[in-house]
Image (cartoon, rainbow, N blue to C red):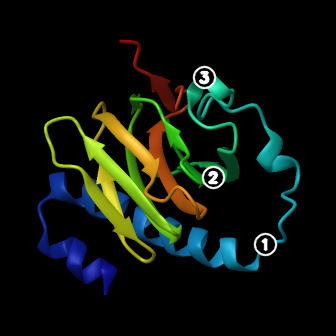
Amino acid sequence: MTIALEMMMPVAGRAQFRLSLVLAAATVCAVVSVRTLPSKMDATSESPLPICASDASAGSSLNKVEVISSHALPDIPGKRVTIVRVTYGPGGFTPPHRHAGTVTAHITKGQIKSQLKGGPVEIFDVGQSFFEPPGAIHLVSANASNTDWAELIAVFVADEGAQLTTLITP
């Protein structure tokens, strides 16, 4: 079916279609993996990828970012897909930031409050997803609760070696 769909679309749209398929598959795999992986991640999660700052000045000290997987995309040279689990403790947040590439986030626990520059503040529940285009400024990224934990799976597609998250200084 994929081949038939690709034959019907212009050449310029094929790469975008393939990337969409990769993102969809990666999101599904990430959600399934999160539900089946043991709570202690292997050495892959401890790799020094520049995802997010992790000290208390970058939000709550209860925040945690774990790399689930990271792979070069062989059919899109120079690009890498990285999947991370972001856990926010009660009242946890990340200061304003931007990402190098696209991000699709899927909420797996609690509620996440989010706002991109120029957009409204939104609250996403378990099972919902949101998308961040390259370079978008993420003004609000927070646990919507001061009493419960929240978690999301983020799928980054960015240039190989890119710093995935950069905090915005006021």
Is residue 79 among the parts visible in the rendering?
no
Marks 3 and 1 sit apart, C-alpha to C-alpha, by: 30 Å
Q: Residue 69, position in %: x, y? A: 68, 54
Q: Which residue is mark 1?
A: 37
Q: Is residue 139 above or below residue 22?
A: above
Residue 12 appears at what percent x and percent y?
16, 51
Q: Residues within 10 Å of mark 1 (few under 14, many from 20)?
A: few
- Provide the residue designation for mark 3: 57
3D distance between C-alphas at marks 2 and 1? 20 Å
Seen in the image, is 41 located left or right of residue 159?
Answer: right
Quarter occupied by the C terminus? top left
Q: In front: 118, or 47?
A: 118
Viewer-side residue, 67 vs 7:
67
Picture coordinates of residue 60 (x, y %)? 61, 38
Question: Sequence order check: which comes first, mark 2 or mark 1?
Answer: 1
| Residues tagged 2 and 1 counted as in contact (Cβ below 8 A) | no
Q: Which amino acid, by three-letter code, is at mark 2?
A: Gly
Q: Are marks 3 and 1 in contact (CB under 8 Å)?
A: no
- For disc 2, the marked residue is 89
Circle 3 sits in a helix, a strand or a loop, which is it? helix
